[in-house]
Image: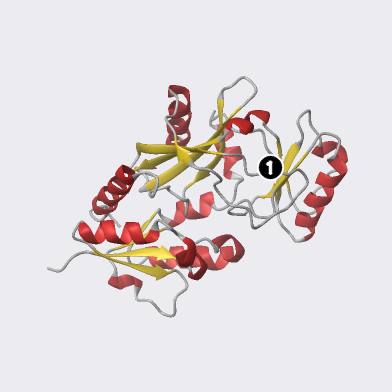
Amino acid sequence: MGAARVAVVTSKGGAEVDADLPLILAALNAAGLSAQAVAWDADRPQWDGYDLAVIRSTWDYADRLAEFLAWAEATERVTRLWNPAPLVRWNSDKRYLLELAGRGIPVVPTRFVEPGGSCDAQDFDGPHGVVVKPAVSSGARDTARYEPGRGADAERHARMLLDQGRTTMVQPYLPLVAEGERALVFFGGVFSHAIRKQPLLTEAGLIDNFRVPHPCAAPYEPTEAELRTARAALAAVPAPGDLLFARVDLALDEDREPVLMELELIEPNLFLRINPQGLERFAEAVAAALTSPR
């Protein structure tokens, strides 16, 4: 029998900038697998010819969500897909934060405004300002923060998104984000490594879709409280079994307690270039996934 075939799923744009992609391919092939990068929307790829498809840098999915979700469901019918299609659908809309909050996970307080819903400038003000972003987005696209007293500007941002038919999120700005956002990476349900990165929304009132996505990312040793919060968030995910990969993004609230910002289960940067041991753990998790039931 030949080596198991693994599709490392990317996109045209993602493959050009994914620094981890060549490392992943080399690690999987060195582990005795036959791995190759395949764009999720490539012309007629034979997904049933792969033993496993691992979603990685499909970084255009938010702009083509219906098409991407249909691809995930169709692919899962003919091969193993990780993470699974139902979870991809669930995680693609940040309204999952409400579900996690309802399950007792400490989440950044979030209000969702649906297209056609009512809102005014008072809904977009707070002691430290607010963050406005679409519920379906990746890489902080169409996202900005607004300082206290700029509620009218924040409302205009929200109405722009709502007029496009996009559900909009409003969150209080957490001042301790200035100490860095934490990203905890898990493989097969087991903590692997973490990084801390500098704040992304450094300039108030600016929608900048060309920001560096993870400024000054560096290795980080999470606290026990951060690990507990991350594990609790993953335990609350509505999916059977452990996930092949997950990234839990946290920040500190005003009491210096960790709160969930986002749970990244579709195509997160896993910072494998920063952590070579993480790359080894990822390859081990992929090998283990090959034995999972379809």
Identify the image quadrant of residue 175. Answer: top right
Q: Please indicate, yes or no, whether residue 237 appears anywhere in the rendered image.
A: no
What residue appears at the point 15 percent right and 69 percent down from the top-left corner?
A: 2
Relative height, residue 169 to residue 233 (above, below): below
Mark 1: which secondary structure? loop
Front residue (pair 212, 148): 212
Question: Farthest top residue?
Answer: 255
Which residue is rendered at x = 42% and y = 44% of the image?
Answer: 246
Residue 242 x, y percent position in the rendering: 35, 42
What is the three-letter code of the residue carrying label 1? Thr
In the picture, measured across the screen, residue 88 lies left or right of residue 165, that is left
Q: Residue at x 80, y 56 (%)?
A: 160
Q: Is residue 147 visible?
A: yes
157 left or right of 216 in image:
right
Residue 132 at x, y = what percent? 73, 45
Number of numbered discs on residues: 1
Residue placed furthest toward the bottom? 43
Q: Which residue is mark 1?
A: 202
